[in-house]
Image (cartoon, rainbow, N blue to C red):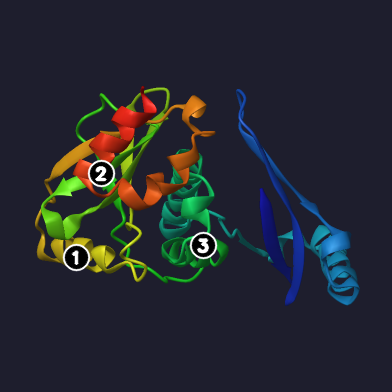
Amino acid sequence: MRCEVTIDDSLVRGEWEFQNDDQPTHRIFLDSARTNPVHFATALNALERMQRNPQNASATISVKLPYTPWKARVALLRMAYLMMFRQFGYSFALHPSSKLLLDQIWNPEAHLIPDAFSVRMTDYSHFNCVGLVTNPPERKSFCVLLKFKTSNRTLVQGIMIPCHDDPEGTVYRRFEADWKSGDRFTGKLRIIPYKQTWLPHANYVDYFFGASNEKWLDRFIENLRR
């Protein structure tokens, strides 16, 4: 684990190594390649003094963990974007409605969209696919279902993606209002089918634009299956 050590007011970068055996131990390796040479030399001199007089030895160790909850949710958004690209191709990727998502993915530190696009699903029967929220109408959006499994639990997370007619992502603000008011969102979700063999179909380019209309979607799928 990377860390920073302050010795005699000099900041030195290093690696903090843990060994978990019968007697857990840890070691810190100072990294001269990632440290200001002046600071590194000052720190080494301070360490030599500490060896001669260990009673007054002291140092401060700090660790910056790379994980943040917001970045983890942006990672989910990135996975959902790729799933949408697999489902709809360049009709989705090149549409203005995807720009909002790409701006957030390319700037994971920033909060460009409301933190209300990820929903824990209670139904695990569908996963790693794309659905459409059809009801209530004001929450109409795509929902990418992602399955995650650890050693002791399995969960499915739903990532909301605006439809083509919502390039500003106004549906996110509606979900955010639900979240702030404490209301649990419940709605009707329709799974949108996907087959790789459909990709060469001449009308497949229209799939992204029409998928948010259930009647159009029914006719489109019927034609593809013929």
The quadrant the C terminus occupies is top left
Residue behind mark 1 = 174
Cα separation between marks 1 and 2: 25 Å
Report the residue at 73% width, 77% height from top: 9
- Rendered view: 19 above or below 181: above
- Looking at the image, which is closer to me, 10 or 199? 199
- Camera-near label (2 vs 3) is 2
Mark 1 and mark 2 in contact? Answer it, CB < 8 Å.
Answer: no
First reached walking from the N terminus: tag 1 or tag 3: 3
Residue 21 placement (x, y as % from top left): 62, 25
First reached walking from the N terminus: tag 1 or tag 2: 1
Report the residue at 45% width, 61% height from top: 98
Q: Quadrant of residue 51?
A: bottom right
Cα separation between marks 1 and 3: 20 Å
Residue 144 placement (x, y as % from top left): 35, 42
Residue behind mark 2 = 216
Q: Secondary structure at mark 3?
A: helix
